């Protein structure tokens, strides 16, 4: 099944909503943060374990809207087409389910996003402060990439 | 176990001269347009501070021209850029953004020194001193 | 009385590999847990080198960031700058001319050659083959010279600019570059032969650190480690950025998936890159000046976001840049290849002997300043040891040098 069919099917099931693109030509699909495990389990079923890999997780602090935006950049093989799965979390107490047990490759991305932005990935035992952030910063409870953080 | 494939090469290197350049006894050959120490020519500089704003390393400070030097008329604010060579990353962004192309670039790579940490003396040497 | 019972005492050793000089001169801590000689668990500890470049980039203007991201990593600075600059070009809607695109590819391929030569040399050093290390480094010097001729500096090129490159080349430089490349090609072929045939290298690398195709994708591995396991991913071939749509090249893929395949793959890619460089120099288009006037570049960036990928020597490098219309970027996210390749591969070390750990680590081509840091841990501590990776590779014998005392 090509990646387009997979995405269309997921859109049909109501898991994804198309929403514009990131330049150059990376389509964005928005999903509900609570359904992340359902989404990626279906993705593995449809595209196969060898059909895609999670390239990176980009967290952005949208301070004005009081949200944290989380983008999963997924590269579909063999065309190597990058698709953006986007979700929004509340800025206070951002939490999302971890994908570590179904896609082990997200380990580095989840650890980094937690350490720098404070997004909690529920079910990831490897999360810890000090993964990247030096001790003097994390001891004050600062997440450096938040817009109001003064480092 | 066969003989190491690389044995010939090792023997040849053993008998030849060392490849290392014996610096400072010998000069290192460097391209004439390599990015080396640079400074502002104050006859062209208009004191606009653009290089200082654009410098990615914040290595350039705009400084008043000392009173014993004749400030050119085209520099109304009497400021000139002083580069801190220890901070400078030699990206030559200042040279590229300068509206009057006032910077003089050299390929001087021997930057270890006890004196010219700043570019002020090099820059001021382009200006005439006031007489009397 | 006959022996009826044997009591086995579990003995496992915690060996921190790093953070000083785990393999390259970069800080990373691998905590390796070993049962006897066999590695049973590896943990990767990072955090020794985080400089907050992403935060720094949010506080500097778009143009100043071009030079800041070039300092993320010394070895792959042109690809970092290229990736960022292309993201800016996407936001601005600027396209450089063909000559500029070709020159960008030339700079990036020169970088790939010297990066691959470096890691192969380090591999030779790690397995104790220092004469080979010296020789490869000597020949790598030619590529550094080529980079100096092209960009004005041996390592930090600062060559990319929005709308083009920062220096043009003339015929004289072109001939010099061709000469250097021809000499290097001969040498690279020779070294590839050495890596294919030399007993020392084969014994240390073959069948060490095998990773399967499925694992590669599950763990999001990219670049040469993925291609050496039969996964054909290459951002150059799929995204066709800059002049990669016009310059002919092959994506090298190997099936073996062990450390040896990864190293040979790098030699093959270096040869491929040399051919690309020669093609570029011989077919350089002349459709105008590739050097944009930096005084006239747009100063305002419209709101927008861009996500660009580039095939760095170590794998896919991605940049996400978001602009909200202000003079500084709202968010810059850098995901370097080592970030995936090092942190996600702790399981590959299992079952190998301790002396293989450095070999496997080097075969990922780790770039810590890119990624920022790793550690491997060994549990149930009976004893603690601290050793230098080089010493570890030699089986921990003490004679190496008194400085590396256990």
Image (tube, rainbow, N blue to C red):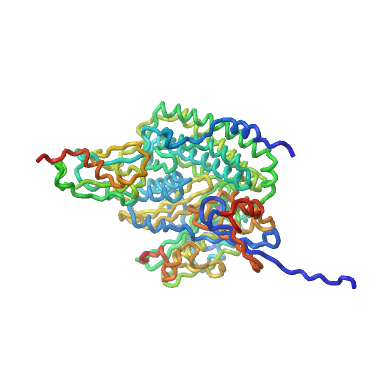
Q: Is residue C275 left or right of residue A59?
A: right
Instruction: Spot the residue most to the right.
Output: C1
Which quadrant is the C terminus of chain C positioned in?
bottom right
* Viewer-closest of A60 and B46: B46
The residue depicted at 47 percent of the width and 40 percent of the height is: C108
| Res. C149 in view | no
User: Looking at the image, how many numbered discs can be counted on the residues?
Assistant: 0
**Residue C67 visible in rendering:** yes
Q: Position of residue B30 (x, y in %)?
A: 41, 34
Residue A149 is left or right of residue C112, and the answer is left
Q: Quadrant of residue C39?
A: bottom right
Pick whichever, C21 or C51, lies toward us.
C21
Q: Quadrant of the N terminus of chain C?
A: bottom right
Q: Position of residue C79 (x, y in %)?
A: 46, 45
Residue C236, image x, y percentages: 51, 42
Q: Residue at x 49, y 52 (%)?
A: C336
In the rendered image, the vertical position of residue B70 relative to residue C385, given as above or below? above
Which residue is most to the left?
B132
Q: Where is residue A85 shown, x and y percent of the image?
A: 49, 59
Which residue does the image show at 59% across and 50% down from the upper left? C362
Please tell me which residue lies in front, C29 or C81.
C29
Quadrant of residue B97 within the rendered picture: top left
From what the image shows, is residue C29 above or below residue C85?
A: below
In which image quadrant can residue B1 be found?
Answer: top right
């Amino acid at each position: 099944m090509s990646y387009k069919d997979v995405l269309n099917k997921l859109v049909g099931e109501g898991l994804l909503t198309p929403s514009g693109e990131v330049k150059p030509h990376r389509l964005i699909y928005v999903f509900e943060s609570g359904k992340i495990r359902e989404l990626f389990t279906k993705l593995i079923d449809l595209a196969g374990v060898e059909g895609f890999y999670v390239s990176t997780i980009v967290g952005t602090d949208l301070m004005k809207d009081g949200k944290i935006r989380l983008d999963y950049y997924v590269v579909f093989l063999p065309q190597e087409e990058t698709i953006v799965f986007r979700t929004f979390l509340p800025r206070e107490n951002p939490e999302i389910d971890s994908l570590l047990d179904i896609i082990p490759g997200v380990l580095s991305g989840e650890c980094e996003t937690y350490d720098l932005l404070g997004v909690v990935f529920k079910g990831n035992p490897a999360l810890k402060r000090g993964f990247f952030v030096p001790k003097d910063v994390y001891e004050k409870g600062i997440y450096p990439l938040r817009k109001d953080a003064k480092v | 176990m066969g003989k190491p494939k690389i044995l010939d090469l090792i023997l040849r290197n053993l008998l030849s001269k060392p490849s290392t350049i014996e610096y400072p006894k010998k000069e290192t050959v460097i391209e004439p347009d390599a990015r080396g120490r640079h400074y502002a020519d104050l006859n062209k500089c208009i004191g606009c501070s653009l290089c200082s704003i654009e410098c990615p390393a914040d290595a350039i400070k705009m400084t008043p021209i000392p009173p014993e030097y004749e400030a050119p008329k085209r520099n109304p604010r009497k400021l000139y850029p002083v580069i801190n060579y220890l901070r400078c990353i030699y990206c030559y962004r200042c040279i590229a953004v300068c509206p009057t192309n006032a910077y003089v670039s050299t390929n001087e790579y021997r930057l270890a020194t006890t004196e010219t940490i700043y570019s002020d003396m090099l820059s001021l040497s382009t200006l005439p001193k006031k007489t009397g | 009385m006959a022996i009826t019972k044997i009591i086995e005492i579990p003995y496992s050793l915690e060996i921190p590999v790093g953070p000083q000089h785990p393999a390259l001169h970069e800080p990373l801590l691998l905590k390796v847990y070993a049962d006897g000689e066999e590695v049973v668990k590896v943990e990767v500890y990072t955090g020794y080198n985080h400089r907050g470049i992403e935060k720094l980039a949010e506080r500097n203007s778009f143009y100043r960031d071009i030079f800041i991201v070039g300092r993320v990593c010394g070895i792959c600075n042109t690809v970092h700058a290229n990736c960022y600059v292309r993201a800016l070009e996407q936001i601005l809607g600027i396209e450089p001319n063909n000559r500029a695109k070709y020159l960008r590819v030339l700079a990036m391929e020169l970088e790939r050659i010297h990066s691959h030569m470096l890691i192969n040399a380090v591999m030779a050093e790690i397995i104790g083959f220092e004469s080979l290390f010296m020789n490869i480094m000597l020949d790598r010097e030619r590529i550094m010279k080529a980079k100096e001729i092209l960009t004005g500096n041996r390592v930090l090129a600062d060559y990319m600019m929005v709308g083009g490159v920062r220096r043009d080349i003339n015929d004289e430089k072109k001939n010099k570059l061709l000469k250097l490349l021809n000499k290097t090609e001969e040498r690279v072929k020779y070294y590839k032969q050495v890596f294919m045939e030399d007993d020392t290298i084969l014994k240390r690398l073959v069948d060490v650190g095998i990773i399967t195709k499925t694992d590669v994708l599950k763990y999001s591995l990219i670049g040469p480690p993925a291609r050496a396991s039969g996964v054909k991913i290459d951002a150059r071939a799929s995204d066709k950025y800059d002049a990669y749509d016009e310059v002919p090249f092959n994506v090298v893929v190997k099936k073996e998936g062990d450390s040896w395949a990864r190293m040979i793959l790098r030699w093959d890619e270096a040869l491929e890159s040399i051919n690309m460089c020669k093609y570029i120099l011989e077919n350089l288009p002349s459709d105008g000046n590739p050097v944009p006037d930096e005084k006239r570049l747009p100063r305002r960036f419209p709101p927008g976001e861009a996500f660009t990928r580039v095939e760095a020597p170590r794998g896919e490098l991605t940049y996400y840049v978001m602009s909200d219309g202000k003079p500084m970027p709202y968010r810059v996210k850098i995901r370097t290849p080592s970030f995936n390749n090092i942190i996600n591969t702790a399981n590959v070390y299992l079952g190998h002997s301790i002396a293989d750990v450095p070999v496997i680590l080097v075969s990922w081509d780790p770039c810590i300043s890119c990624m920022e840091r790793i550690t491997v841990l060994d549990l149930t501590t009976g004893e603690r040891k601290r050793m230098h990776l080089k010493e570890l590779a030699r089986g921990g014998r003490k004679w190496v040098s008194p400085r590396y005392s256990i």
